[in-house]
Structures are given as structure tokens and as C-alpha cells.
Amino acid sequence: MKEQGLELTFNLNKVSFEELERNRIAQGNHDEIIFPVPQDWKKVLIPFGDTNTYVNLNDPQADFLRLLFLKREFIPLNLNLPVLLFFPIKNSKTINPQLYTLEPSPPLILNRGIYQIDVPLYAKDVSKLFLDVVKNNIALTIVMSPPHKNNTINWAIEFIDEKTLENRFVEAIMAQEHGILHDFALIDETSIRHRFREYLRKLSLFLKDGSPLDLSAEISGNKVFIIFEDKKEKVASKPN
């Protein structure tokens, strides 16, 4: 059927909230919920003349089909993320760490030689297990490229040592799912690695009120100031 370009689609409206809740509780209250695909869903609609016929899947992996649902909620990081300066080589003659350094001014603090952002942060669209695996390897990176208007520069979320984190996530998920499925043959390592990469791509940071983290950085002299503005409290720290 794969060779014929046929696709299997599911109507997720058939999955009730009550059914997902039963599965969640039975599986140990994880925020990722495994939903085994019912047998009567494993059929493909094949055009045949003037009629359409449903044919059962003939894939040997069909018995292992399942859907994964993620309970969407804000998950606290419970740590102050480190802040780093990244200096592109092409600009290093005029912009380099000998000329520019971070300035510890709120919300940026200097803790045991590590610059950190002192703001309670939350993640969304990822699982708690994923966040537990990666959060100590997340950094906020300020890109020290030539500034544009208003002397502002960009920032990004960076994951340090992604391959090691991916392997840890795979090990943790396989242990968790084996406790649910009780059979390693039912666990697809390839899909777990894909899930990890999707979480890396989707992870965003939020404030306690649910608004996205909104940072900017400004250069004053040879100091780089991190600017944070709380949209509710209108709190900002800027260079004098």
C-alpha cells in the first residue's frame, strides 16, 4: 500500500477527553498519553471503479500503531538560565569578547561567574520529561553581530550537546514506555528521536502570566545590557 501512495488518516475527534484521561491515569499520570489505534481504524480507502472499498492494513507493524497525545500546559523551569554572548568570526575584528562583555544589571545576575537571567520562566508544547532532560543544557545566546537600528541585537535559545541530550531522552522514554507497554518490541526508537527533535524545534519560553519571553539586548560603550520588559508590570532595566 505504501508503494501505491495510499495514506492512512485518523479522525481524532473520535478520541474523547474521557478516554484520554483514563489512559493518562492508567499510564501513571504522564503528560504524554499513549493511545493504541483501534483495530477498526486500521483500514485504507481504496478507489475501485465507481465504488470505494476499505482494505485492512497489510503492514506487519500495523499491530503496533498508536497515537501520542501531549497535555499542553506551562511547565516551570525552576532555574535561572545562563546567558552567553556569541561572536561570529566574520565580525571579530570589531566585535569580540575583548571589547564587549555582559553587564550584570537586572534581570541579569552574575552567579559564581555565570551570567544568568533572574526571571521565572515556563516552557510549553514539550513534555515534562523532555524539559527535565534538557533544561540544564539550555542557554540564552546573544548574537553579537553589527547592530541595526536602535542599537539592538538578537537572541536565541540554544541547546548545548544536543546528541547527548537526545540519547538521554531516548533512554528515559524507553524506560517509561516499557513500564506502560511491557514490551520493548512495541517501542519505536526512531519515532522517539523524531519526537525529541520536534520538541527542540517547538520549545518556547514564557513568563508566569503566559506571555512569551520578550528580551532584547543593547550595547552601551563596551557593555551589553539585557533588556527585559514585563508586559503586565512594565518593568525594564536599561543602561544609563
Image (spheres, helix red, strand yellow):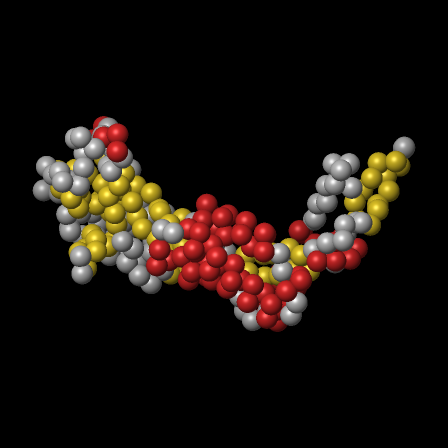
Q: Quadrant of residue 175?
A: bottom right
| Front residue of this view, candidates 60 and 213 | 60
Q: Nearer the viewer, residue 60 or 70?
A: 60
Question: Which x, y percent locates residue 142?
Answer: 26, 42
For the residue pair 130 and 74, the one nearer the viewer reads as 130
Q: Is residue 195 left or right of residue 91?
A: right
Instruction: Give the percent coordinates (x, y) of residue 102.
Output: 17, 46
Quadrant, the C terminus = top left
Picture quarter with the N terminus: top right
Residue 181 x, y percent position in the rendering = 64, 67
Query: Observer-nearest residue: 39 or 3?
Result: 3
* Residue 97 sits above or below residue 117 on the image: above
Q: Residue at x 53, y 52 (%)?
A: 193
Picture residue at 50% right of the left edge, 48% below the top? 198
In the rendered structure, the answer to whether residue 152 lies left or right of residue 71 reads left
Q: Specify whether residue 194 is in view.
A: yes
Q: Position of residue 236 (x, y in %)?
A: 20, 47
Left or right of 66: which side holds 204?
Answer: left
Residue drawn at x 10%, y 37% as measured from the top left: 221
Residue drawn where x is 33% and y is 48% of the image: 213
Q: Which picture quadrant has residue 146?
A: top left
Q: Is residue 168 left or right of residue 161?
A: right
Total numbered labels = 0
Q: In this rendering, does residue 15 appear at all?
A: no
